[in-house]
Image (tube, rainbow, N blue to C red):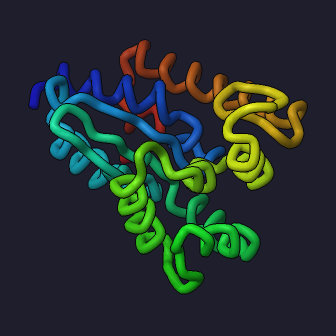
Amino acid sequence: MTREEYSRFEQKLAFHAAPALLGIKASNMLSLSHRDFDIAENINRFNERAAAKGLHIEVLCECKNKALMLVYNRRLLEKRLADPVIRRFLTVYGYSEELKTDGCLHRLAQRMKESDGFPHEVGIFLDYPLEDVIGFIENAGANYKLCGCHKVYGDAVRAARVFSNYEKCRNFLCGRLNTGHDIYQALKIN
């Protein structure tokens, strides 16, 4: 793998996953082409270096051409999945209440392979408010109040602030990379 390829990987990571990498969101998704990246090597390298900061990338599903990955902050995702209301919601989709974070991620990957699209509970893992996840399911994606990083069915004012903060994260992290820092320097990872 060349430094140029890894630099492109870091740029994609910063653009698509800045809120999770900077600790204000449990996770983000990222899709990469096998043609453009040695995905396994890039993920292994990132996971080794970022583990100390609680950051991780996991492939949820892949096909011949692409891999869909979850970039997550373990502490925030564990906290999210420990919420009893969230856990009750997830049981409807086959996530037993005894599953730990890794078990839930495995079940999500399983559901992604079984589904004809995205399983709706993916919004829980992506840190969307439960009311927005339920609203999306009940309205089949229609009748939303605001569409930004996701479709909003609850508090649109709060969501607009959150979306703005996500954009600030993206601008900050991408800006750091554009000034010559690598992702680890930008995230203060040794």
Identity of the residue drawn at 29% across and 29% down = 9
Q: Horizontal and vertical percent for residue 182?
A: 35, 28
Q: Is residue 93 left or right of residue 49?
A: right
| Image position of 76 with respect to 17: above or below | below
Q: Quadrant of residue 117?
A: top left
Q: Horizontal and vertical percent for residue 48?
A: 27, 54
Identity of the residue drawn at 18% across and 23% down = 36
Q: Residue furthest top?
A: 179
Q: Is residue 154 visible?
A: yes
Closest to the observer, 135 or 83: 135
Q: Horizontal and vertical percent for residue 185?
A: 40, 34
Q: Residue furthest bottom?
A: 98
| Image position of 119 with respect to 75: above or below | above
Closest to the observer, 131 or 77: 131
Q: Is residue 116 left or right of residue 141?
A: left
Identity of the residue drawn at 51% across and 52% down = 119
